[in-house]
Amino acid sequence: MSTKLTVYSEEERLSLLHSYYESGMSKKAFCKLHGLSTSKLLNNWIAKYSPSVENELPLPSDEPSEEMANRSKEDYKEEVALLKKRVKELEKALSFSKLETEVRDMLIDRAEEYFNIPIRKKSGAK
């Protein structure tokens, strides 16, 4: 069983590198998606072309965008209300998780007493 060796032109390599940087995917997943043989091939291209590719990619601006500057008070109030709602949901989930952990600990304590065997791992055990 032999595989056909694919030779990529410089344009194709740069195009794939742009796609890789914009995708945010892992190297392995990107290679699998685009049919590249190994992630080592992508690493070689990154090493060879990274200075030119990085200069061509747009960088996010540190200045607030016009969209943010033109937002109304109602938009901010709506966003704050949504965030407060989300915080309450997360606090409820956290309290439920704490309760669940407490119940599990009580159950283990009762089982240890009833069966007279240690269930929890001891801190010094190897």
Image (cartoon, grey):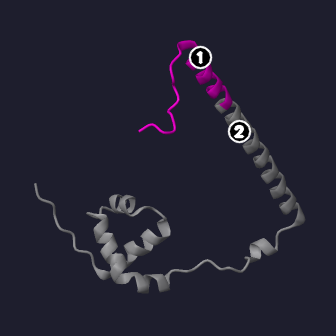
Q: Which numbered disc, 1 or 2, marks the residue closer to the eye?
A: 1
> What residue span does the magenta drawing correspond to?
102-126
Identify the residue at image location x=22%, y=74%: 7
Judged left or right of residue 59, residue 31 is left
Disc on the earlier residue, 1 or 2: 2
Q: Which residue is mark 1?
A: 113
Report helix, strand or loop for mark 1: helix
Q: Position of residue 79 (x, y in %)?
A: 80, 57
- As displayed, is residue 8 above or below residue 30? below
Residue nearest the viewer, comparing 95 with 87: 95
Q: Quadrant of the N terminus?
A: bottom left
Identify the residue at image location x=28%, y=70%: 41
Q: Quadrant of residue 64?
A: bottom right
- As displayed, is residue 20 above or below residue 121? below
Q: Position of residue 113 (x, y in %)?
A: 59, 16
Residue nearest the viewer, comparing 108 with 26: 108
Q: Residue furthest front?
A: 124
Judged left or right of residue 99, residue 69 is right
Q: Is residue 118 magenta?
A: yes
Q: Position of residue 116 (x, y in %)?
A: 53, 16
